[in-house]
Image (cartoon, rainbow, N blue to C red):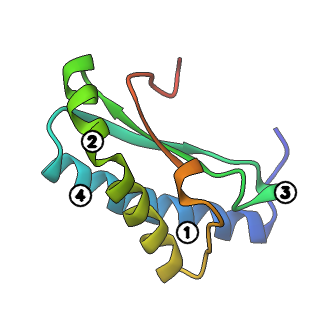
Amino acid sequence: MKKLSSVQKKQQALVMDVVTTLEQQAIQQLAGVQQCWFSMEYNVFPSSLLVRLQFVEQAALDAAQAVLLPWQKKLSGLLLKKGVVLKDMRKHLVFTLSGPES
């Protein structure tokens, strides 16, 4: 793996901060949240950013699908506060059962 540049390190720190905040809120407000994780390609940030909110079981995931849009807006707002604008917020947050190892 290639070493990250200083700009890429700043991008990673920014996204990590936002994802950690989102994860803490989700654990408090949504039933069955296990963790939140992200992936991105630094050379096409922020369009490549994909945040996944992982649930423990299918029932919790199904129940949470009704509030996906407000959580996508929440992610967009948290990033906007850090100076990152998402063109289409619906492409950057998904609810899943899969973990980072999957």
Q: Is residue 22 above or below residue 85?
A: above
Mark 2 or 1 closer to N-term? 1
- The residue at 69%/62% (across/down) is 46
Of residues 84 and 87, the one drawn nearer to the viewer in this rendering: 87
The reply to whether dot 1 and dot 4 touch (C-beta < 8 Å) is no
Q: Residues within 10 Å of mark 1 (few under 14, many from 20)?
A: some
Q: Residue 17 occupies which quadrant of the picture?
A: bottom left
Element type at marker 1? helix
Mark 2 or 4 closer to N-term? 4
The Cα–Cα distance between marks 3 and 1, rounded to whole angstroms, is 15 Å
Q: Where is residue 16 in the image (x, y as percent from the top left)?
A: 50, 58
Element type at marker 2? helix
Mark 3 or 1 closer to N-term? 1
Residue labelled with disc 2? 66
Q: Residues within 10 Å of mark 4 (few under 14, many from 20)?
A: few
Q: Residue 14 carries which label?
A: 1
The Cα–Cα distance between marks 2 and 4, rounded to whole angstroms, is 17 Å
Which amino acid is tagged 1?
A: Leu
Q: Is residue 31 above or below residue 79?
A: above
Which amino acid is tagged 4?
A: Gln
The Cα–Cα distance between marks 2 and 3, rounded to whole angstroms, is 33 Å
Q: Which residue lies furthest to the front in this view?
A: 66
Q: Where is residue 38 in the image (x, y as percent from the top left)?
A: 54, 45
Residue labelled with disc 3? 43
- The residue at 69%/64% (across/down) is 9
Which amino acid is tagged 2?
A: Ala
Mark 1 or 4 closer to N-term? 1
Q: Nearer the viewer, mark 2 or mark 3?
A: 2
